[in-house]
Amino acid sequence: DTEVTQTPKHLVMGMTNKKSLKCEQHMGHRAMYWYKQKAKKPPELMFVYSYEKLSINESVPSRFSPECPNSSLLNLHLHALQPEDSALYLCASSRLRLGTYEQFFGPGTRLTVL
Amino acid sequence: GIQVEQSPPDLILQEGANSTLRCNFSDSVNNLQWFHQNPWGQLINLFYIPSGTKQNGRLSATTVATERYSLLYISSSQTTDSGVYFCARAGGSQGNLIFGKGTKLSVKP
């Protein structure tokens, strides 16, 4: 099974709302990632968790708060977002053994901030 | 920094035609992946190919790591092949990917 699941598929929120995106994988992968993709652009890295610890934060604004409760789950908490944060948010996972970095992506959450 | 360049940026084909997509990268890789992004945004893994040649049905890929490029071949294209094709390589020891800008493929019936 090479499946990464994400919920919700679509999310519309106001600038004062608090919401969370959820990602889950059961492949035993120890690295999990959040990417952000704007229209007609490639995905860009936001955060990396390896062995449930935050290892990379690509200078993401604090209104995005990641959390890794266990090795299978990854959350992205959203608060006080701006309309320019509207995008497709993709979660991914991979092994961390050299030579086996193949990454698998979830279907994404399409976020609209009003 | 690490760069990934894809060409062509856009490609329009008639159904049944063959095509070659190219990915150049700025330094040596130990991870090179090709993805197809469908109209709903899902990134579908096509190949994990840091070197060598692989085939999967009508698709095949070749990476020549010493010359820093990878090619994706699509034969007998179908309308369902339409979408954006990305190549991506690992940017560091955490496996995070750096993507090229993609090739947008449109296959006309």
Image (cartoon, coloured by chain):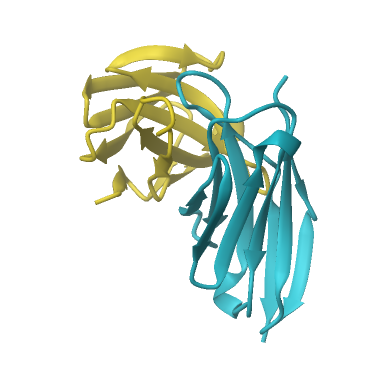
Chain colours: A yellow, B cyan
The answer to whether one can see residue A17 in this image is: no
- At horizontal 29% and vertical 25% (from top left) the residue drawn is A30
Spot occupied by residue B76 in the image (x, y as percentages of width and height): 63, 80
Spot occupied by residue A84 in the image (x, y as percentages of width and height): 61, 33
Q: In this view of the protein, which residue sits in the foreground, A103 or B24?
A: B24
Quadrant where the C terminus of chain B sits is bottom right
Q: Residue furthest bottom?
A: B109
The answer to whether one can see residue B93 in this image is: yes
For this view, does B60 lie left or right of residue B9? left
For this view, does A65 lie left or right of residue B102? left
Spot occupied by residue B6 in the image (x, y as percentages of width and height): 74, 46
Q: In this view of the protein, which residue sits in the foreground, A22 or B27?
A: B27
- At horizontal 58% and vertical 48% (from top left) the residue drawn is B52
Q: In this view of the protein, which residue sits in the foreground, B26 or A1?
A: B26
For this view, does A52 lie left or right of residue B91? left
Q: Which quarter of the picture shows residue B21?
A: bottom right
Quadrant where the N terminus of chain B sits is top right
- At horizontal 59% and vertical 39% (from top left) the residue drawn is B88
User: Tag count in the figure?
Assistant: 0
For this view, does A98 lie left or right of residue A27? right
- At horizontal 41% and vertical 29% (from top left) the residue drawn is A33
Spot occupied by residue A104 in the image (x, y as percentages of width and height): 40, 43
